[in-house]
Image (tube, rainbow, N blue to C red):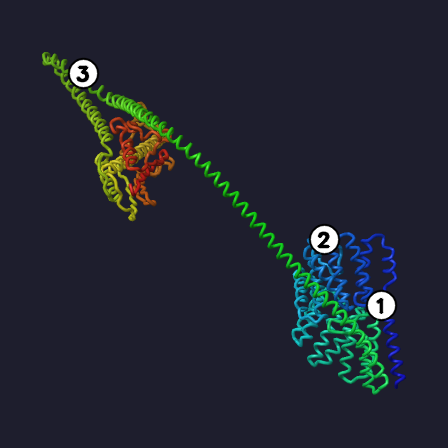
Amino acid sequence: MKRFIIILLFVTFVCNIKAQPVLPDSLQIAYQSAPDDSVKFKISRVIYTFYEETNRDSALHYAQVRYAVAKKYHRRIEEAYLQGQMGYQQIYLGRFSEALTNLTKAIQIATESKEENAWELTPFNTPGKSREITLSMLNHMYGHLKLQTGSSESVHYFKEGRRIGLEIGNDFRVTVGDMVLATNYLMLNQPDSALVFAMEGEKYAIRGGISKYLAYIWSVMGNIYQHKGADSLALSYYQKSLQLAKTEGNFTVVSGTYVNLCNYYQSKKNADSLLYYAASNLSVMKSLGAVTSSVAGDINLGYAFQSLAEGFALKGNTDSTNKYLQLALTVKDSLTAIKLKRLAAFQRLTLDEQLRQQNEEKKRVESETRRRMYVLLAGIVVACIIILLIYRNNRQKQKAYNLLQKQKSETDLQKKKADTALQELKSTQAQLIQSEKMASLGELTAGIAHEIQNPLNFVNNFSEVSAELIDEATGSRQRAAENSPEVGELLSDIKQNLVKINHHGKRADAIVKGMLQHSQSGRGQKEPMDINALAEEYLRLSYHSFQNKNPDVKIEIKSDFDPTINKVNVVPQDIGKVLFNVLNNAFYACAEHSRIAEAERSRNVESALNRNTDAESGRATSNTTENENQNESADSQPRLRRSPLSVEHTNRNTNDELPRSFLPGPYHPQVSISTKTNENKIDITVTDNGTGIPQKIIDKIFQPFFTTKPTSQGTGLGLSLTYDIIKAHGGEIRVSSLENQGSEFIITLITNA
């Protein structure tokens, strides 16, 4: 039995040595024949990755080679990243003080550097995020250092590295962060939290194709399930982990999984399996050459010998048990001494680092104190300069004030002269205004004289003729017997002359009265007035006045008064004149349009009747001489125009026999008045559908003595008077018109006027 066990251990040892991966010759040749440093840098990265978890001494060597190239070309981000890789290998070779030095320098470089376009740092790269990848990796490595030196701060650094990886979307950095956090929480006896991180790491590892560390995650999951009592599930994860780790050449995971399997089979009292995995782990540990080769704790040759001793103890082989226990104690004592020495060095370095940081802090405080002192001195100097400037400015202001007083005295003198000149200018201006008024009055007087001259000429002419006629009539009375008819004619002419004299005299009287109204407008007192009531009253008065003069014209009247209008301060008589004048013009325009429309209709009807009569005459027969004579007699007499009245009383319905083109549509005269409030204004709108105002004269309608009415019906002062009244009230009057379609007058008054 003893011989069988020895043979088994030997075969296992030899197989594991043969199973160790060997660097391909192609890589070695490519590295040795690299034409330049950039190619050498890339090839050495591949070689480092090959040795990273299989032979830490070789991995450290190639990391140092790459660091030398980066330093040669002053690639700061690359320097920091490679110092992190060197620190990782040094941690698990037990060289903690060297690892601390490298990691401290690397973190400082990465923090201060702004470079982003670095050389390729890792197979799992994120373009444009080299600095963030480096910081994530350095925090992760610092966590490893804290973990292996027994510091509880390791979790913080692992989480910080994982956080940066998540921010930049790098699956590799997240995977390794979850991997070590799962181990940490299991060491803290928190299997549920450990399982959460392990399962998340498994997800990211599968998604990112990170098989090299997926094996480690499965090994940790096996430990978690063994801790939870799920032995079969734990064993399956151990086997999966071991198979994948061997395939990927990750000897760190292979060694750690061998230890886990040894612990598992020791708990199950399975000596054969325990001896098998202990012997397998022995060759792997020799390849790694590490003092501490696992995140979870110390794994070294001493533990491999101890596992062999425990296997032989289960077998009852006392000699082998004692032999391997002795070897285990010897190796452990030696490695423990080395580790303690290195921990002491690390602690001294840590203490030195703390002292260095304290000195730097002291220097920083001193520098800050000096800076504050300099700032204070600079402030004092600036204050002195400001005081000097203020003093200088005050002196200049005093000089400027004295100069200003002198200039003010001169200015006062000039002001007195200017006031005297202004008084003279005002006197001259008043004289000019008076002269202008006199000139305007002269123009007005000339207009009045011209307008009154026409009726006075008629009065004079007809009075002279009447006097001559009276003289003739006196002479004719002597010949009364024989010339009595001539006297009658003379008296008739005299009567007609007197009628014309009376007519033109009244016209002159109307002109004078209009001028008096024009001159007297605006002299009344303003009082609050209901505009709606005033408009309705003058609408009624104006229409009644129009009906008395034109009883045969019927006009439709519409009114739309805004009930929300408040009383307005106006002169009622003046606003009444305005409404009366505008409404009179509207009624007159409608009457004129009605007259024109009726005349046009009459002409069309008469023309149509004449054409019908001619047609009937052409169709008449010539059977009798009497008819022919009658037709000839009718043709020889002039045709008389027929009035519309005669047409309406004929025995036939004329409209039924006339073409529609000769019968224009009926005209319905209409005048409307409305009021509307608009903020602080009131609009009074008068609209008609009368003759309208031609555009060429619409700008003249408010001029004095301008009228389109016949001489006997208007003086041209109504709208001029209206315009002056509205302006005196602070309002305005606007007009819009289309010829033959109607007009609209809008009167706007201010409510607070």
Task: Tell me the element at label 1.
Answer: loop
Q: x%, y% of residue 627?
A: 31, 27
Considering only vertical position in the picture, is 602 above or below 337?
above
Question: How many C-alpha atoms fall within 10 Å of the one at disc 3: few (<14), some, or many (≥20)?
Answer: few
Task: Tell me the element at label 3.
Answer: helix
Residue carrying label 2: 117
Residue 464 disc label: 3
Q: Is residue 633 visible?
A: no
Residue 21 disc label: 1
Residue at the spot 88% in from the left edge and 78% down from the top edge: 10
Q: Residue furthest bottom?
A: 316
Give me the C-alpha separation between circle 3 and circle 2: 122 Å
Q: Nearer the viewer, residue 43 or 108?
A: 108
Q: Of the residues under marks 3 and 2, which one precedes in the sequence?
A: 2
Q: Is residue 408 visible?
A: yes
Residue 51 disc label: none
Considering only vertical position in the picture, is 65 above or below 214?
above
Give the amino acid at mark 1: Pro
Task: Tell me the element at label 2.
Answer: loop
Considering only vertical position in the picture, is 651 above or below 201?
above
With 287 as the anchor, is 646 left or right in this view?
left
Give me the C-alpha separation between circle 3 and circle 1: 153 Å
